[in-house]
Amino acid sequence: MDCRGSAARRNATVVDEAGRQIAVPTRIERIVSLAPSLTELAVAAGAVDRLVGVSSADDLPQVDSLAHISALPVDFEGILNLNPDLVLLLEGVNRSEDADRLRDLGIAAYVFDATAIDDVLADIQRLGEMVGTEETANDRARTLRDAVDFVTSTAAAAPERPSVLVLVGDADLYAFGSGSYIQDLVRRAGGSSITADIPQMNAVLSEEYVLSQDPDVIVGAFGEDYDVAELTRNHPAFAQLRAVRSGRIYSVDPDVLLRPGPRLVDALAVIAVRLHPEAFNQRGDGVVVLE
């Protein structure tokens, strides 16, 4: 592989969200995204026409025709062939050593790290500034901020804050600890996460832990067509949980819940309506779930 070493392309220095200084072209016209949430970030920032490659996990219709690059492991040769001005990586999804390798190859690699909805909104604007689409990015961030504020204020007015368990897996009970954006989602949606005090960002829970916490609501990233009875088939002891007895087990599209990008606003709305249906029904104007 040939390394890119053109100093002429490195005209500005920025600091990414992993704290690394990066030399980037002042004009960015070719972007490769190595995480679906960052592809969605680029779309929101008005930079979809700058994308020349995305990760093999990307499925947005807007990027169907683009090159799909392996992110785990990273296809460095494929990235080099696309001649990008900038590669986008996500902390916790992409490996830090992959960012270092890209930089060694002369490619500007920017690492994002979204641990809350506010981070996502700021990242839309930050990317817009980097690629010169500030107006579009700022408008989109404002629209999303208005939706977040509406959902948050409506949920905050609800009289109760139910305890909530958010799960990725219904068999292995894969969940999120402190530092995860999931905690921000549950809090803003008017709930109290039973995993907020777990020190690891990601954790596999025991049945005993879930039974001891006895959540009021369980939200799973199992898909919209999921049979909620599958959870108790996998864990018969869960039949005694408050969430199960009251029928408050909800399953959502994993792409909405598990991608820390603009669609977290959709995830916030979906969770908030499940936690506080009465509060949102009373508002009349409803929740805007974004397209």
Image: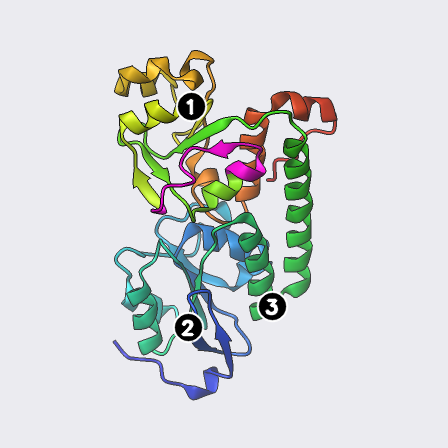
* Image coordinates for residue 211, horizontal then vertical, percent: 33, 22
Dot label at residue 225: 1
* Image coordinates for residue 273, horizontal then vertical, percent: 59, 27
Nearer to the camera, 73 or 171: 171
Whole-angstrom CA distance, mark 2 to mark 3, is: 18 Å
Main SS, magenta residues = loop
- The residue under label 2 is 20
Above or below — where is 242 with respect to 11?
A: above
The disc, 2 or 1, on the residue closer to the chain's N-terminal end is 2
Q: Is residue 117 magenta?
A: no
**Kind of residue sitting beneath label 1:** Asp
Dot label at residue 207: none
- Marks 2 and 3: which is nearer the front? 2
Whole-angstrom CA distance, mark 1 to mark 3, is: 39 Å
* Image coordinates for residue 90, horizontal then vertical, percent: 41, 57
- The residue under label 3 is 129
Whole-angstrom CA distance, mark 2 to mark 1, is: 42 Å
Magenta residues (range): 186-201
- Marks 2 and 1: which is nearer the front? 2
Q: Quadrant of the N terminus?
A: bottom left
Res. 148 in view: yes
The disc, 1 or 3, on the residue closer to the chain's N-terminal end is 3
Decide if residue 161 is on the left or right side of residue 136: left
Q: Residues within 10 Å of mark 3 (few under 14, many from 20)?
A: some
